Image (cartoon, helix red, strand yellow):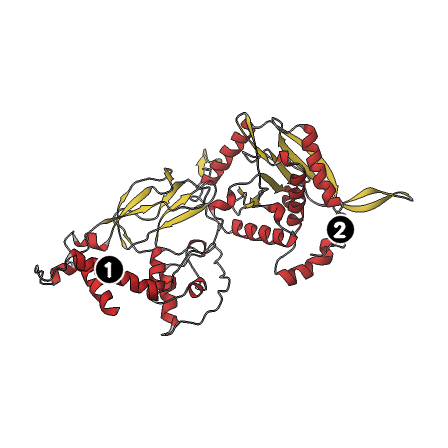
Amino acid sequence: MTNFVAQYKSVQERYTPMAKFELKLPKMGESVAEATVTNWLKEIGDTIEADEAVLEIATDKVDSEVPSEVDGVLVERLFEADDVVQVGQTIAIIETEDDMGSNGTETAAEDVDETPAEKPSPDVVAAVEERVTEAKASTQPVIENKGDRFYSPLVKNIASEEGITQNELDAVPGTGKDGRVTKNDILSYLKNRGSAPAAVTSAPKTQQPEKPVSASKPVVPVSVNGEDEIIEMTRMGKLIAHHMIESTQTSAHVQSFVECDVTKIWNWRNKVKAGFEKREGEKLTFTPIFMEAVAKALREFPMLNISVDGDKIIKRRNINLGMAAALADGNLIVPVIKNADQLNLVGMSKAVNDLAHRARNGQLKPDEVQGGTYTVTNVGTFGSVMGTPIINQPQVGILALGAIRKVPAVIETSEGDFIGIRYKMFLSHSYDHRVVNGALGGQFVKAVADYLEAWDVNREV
């Protein structure tokens, strides 16, 4: 097979026609059809290595980088900053090394004595190529993208040529965007790998490097009259402002409030949280408990798990809970827990902690902030007792969780009423009065409170 490979490479080097590589906007998720160019990292004429980021893009709220799949020189940019690009569209043209040879550099073909007898016929080239393909297919491992591990064509080729298995590659730590394995990562791994492949039976979960939240260009205050400042809004700030105005102009907002006694939950959590963390490796916060109650209430009141399209109501089949999370720059992002009603408390805790962690570190994928059917926001995190949140379009409801407070309260018993210390919080429900009347809106939030107040203090988790 080695002779065939050598002959095939020789044929390619001498007779492959020169071509320019089209860098296209990659698919970023099933529900993502377009993205906005936010910043070019390379200028025309810059040399680019394979797997090196060429530009930054943004979907609704998630920023990403687009890497090159080839080595070459950037010769054309087809879009500028703030332009909207559709998935699959060509963003830029990269001139590869073969093209560079046409600009005056010597190519492999100039180093050989080209005679008609030496040039193989098309049938010979096709036969060699077919033999090489068959040989590679039978001897080299197949590398696939699995879960959130994405491998570029270059990384896949290097892994195949070096005999790296799927499990072995999955265990290589990545330093690229979202923990992606870059060319340098795999070359560094090969350098320290030794002559024999490492025996890897199962791939440990790689720890992705924590990165700061992607932000727009630095905010530069401009002094006015030596006193006031004009601060340019960030890109995300502009998107949020537009989204909020659009929501208030679309939906007829109305609110219902319920005070909820969470003393049972407070005491139960204090009892089980240490054991839960030791067993599951996850902290047990109040958020997954509240999300579980909301998911149950949405099953009971499915007409709040809807959206409006003109004069039509779309009743959503899946319960996908949005979870508003604060970012380091003060903005909010809403990752989505898909099929939340199908998760037990352990699964809900893992989903909440994972999404919150990756939201703070700018590691969310576009699909993870799409498809929500109802949203929950925790205003109590900032000390607020209650709030009147704005609906996250195209949904029709959003629930705000107030701060948990220790307050004196009347306790009713069979022996009479007493004053005692209880842990209480306000639930604030904003809903679209076009399609959700006051009765339904009030019943829903009361159902959430009832689930929480009826908490089983002997529940195992």
* Residue 322 placement (x, y as % from top left): 57, 42
- Relative to 215, 116 lies left or right: left
Identify the amino acid type marked 2.
Asp
* Residue 241 placement (x, y as % from top left): 51, 34
339 and 77: which is toward the camera: 339
Instruction: Rate crowding at label 1 as few (under 14), some (14 to 19) or many (20 or more) other CA atoms within 10 Å.
Output: some
Label 2 residue SS:
loop
Residue tagged by mark 1? Answer: 129
For the question of whether residue 461 can be seen, the reply is yes
Gap in angstroms between the C-alphas marked 1 and 2: 68 Å
Q: Is residue 88 above or below residue 228?
A: below
Q: Is residue 266 above or below residue 426?
A: below
338 and 317: which is toward the camera: 317
* Residue 422 placement (x, y as % from top left): 78, 46
- Relative to 90, 358 lies left or right: right
Identify the amino acid type marked 1.
Glu
Instruction: Rate crowding at label 2 as few (under 14), some (14 to 19) or many (20 or more) other CA atoms within 10 Å.
Output: few
Residue 456 numbered mark, or none: 2
Query: How many numbered marks appear?
Result: 2
- Relative to 368, 342 lies left or right: right
Residue 278 numbered mark, or none: none
Q: Earlier in the sequence, mark 1 or mark 2?
A: 1
Label 1 residue SS:
helix
* Residue 363 placement (x, y as % from top left): 48, 51
For the question of whether residue 323 can be seen, the reply is no
Of badges 1 and 2, nearer the viewer stands 1
Q: Residue at position x 19%, y 59% from top?
A: 125
In the image, farthest residue toward the right: 415
